[in-house]
Amino acid sequence: MGKLILVDACCGPCAMTALRCLEYGPGDVFFTFFNHNVHPYTEYARRRDAFREAMEMEAVEFEVLPYLPEEWWRAVAFREESRCEMCYRLRLRRAAERAAVMGLERFTTTLLASPYQDHELIGRIGETLADEMGLRFLPWDGREVYRQVLQEAREKGIYTQPYCGCLLSERERYDPAFRRRGGRERGRD
């Protein structure tokens, strides 16, 4: 195959950011799209299609793994406060497994493009999984070019999402009363 690194991709614009920041050319990377956390399905489909469009524009090899929201629900149920950590673990484990199956020694994630994600936690999880599976996790930081690449994506007509992806992040984005209460349910203060 000739690829050097597998990149877990959350969306088209963040995949584009990875291509701008990583020291690998388009022929050296393989992107995998596994977004079990994205709800509703119509949002997942928009992101999947935008990812495909971006990868085709960038001439990069990629795959779209099956949509398995049940896996995310089971991991997050009754752990809503740590949903991001659970999501990171699921995504990065799948990326590490795919890298191992493909015979690649390195993996990383486009989650490291976003200023909204916990880079330190992602790095710790990635390193732990890499150690477990005999791989190398590549940390990087795309936050400085993130907004510039989002603008580039918009100019190219690539969909950019308004919230992280899960049902809870959608609620945080669109429910002002929920945000005013600090994300707590009424009566659960």
Image: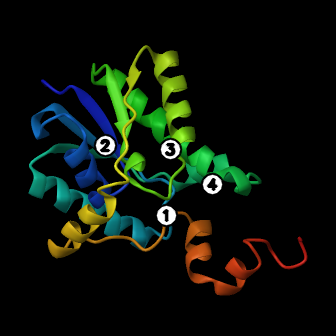
Render colour scheme = rainbow
Label 4 sits on a secondary structure element that is helix
Measured Cα–Cα span from mark 1 to mark 2: 17 Å
The kind of residue on which mark 3 rests is His
Crowding around mark 1 (Cα neighbors within 10 Å: few <14, some 14 to 19, many 20+) is: some
Of the two numbered discs 1 and 2 on the same chain, state the one appearing first in sequence: 2
Q: Residue furthest top?
A: 134
Of the two numbered discs 3 and 4 on the same chain, state the one appearing first in sequence: 4
Which corner quadrant holds the N terminus?
top left
Label 2 sits on a secondary structure element that is strand
The kind of residue on which mark 2 rests is Thr
Of the two numbered discs 1 and 3 on the same chain, state the one appearing first in sequence: 3
Residue at image position (50%, 67%) is: 39
Marks 1 & 3, CB-CB < 8 Å contact: no
Measured Cα–Cα span from mark 2 to mark 4: 21 Å
Q: Which residue is mark 1?
A: 165
Would you place residue 144 above or below residue 24 in this image? below
Image spot of residue 109 (x, y percent): 38, 41
The kind of residue on which mark 1 rests is Gly
Looking at the image, residue 142 sits to the left or right of residue 171; the answer is left
Foreground label between 1 and 4 = 1
Q: Which residue is mark 2?
A: 32
Q: Which residue is mark 3?
A: 119
Crowding around mark 2 (Cα neighbors within 10 Å: few <14, some 14 to 19, many 20+) is: many
Measured Cα–Cα span from mark 1 to mark 4: 13 Å
Image spot of residue 87 (x, y percent): 56, 48
Q: Residue furthest front?
A: 144
| Quadrant of the rendered image containing residue 27 | top left
* Rendered image: mark on residue 155: none
* Rendered image: mark on residue 73: 4
| Quadrant of the rendered image containing residue 172 | bottom right
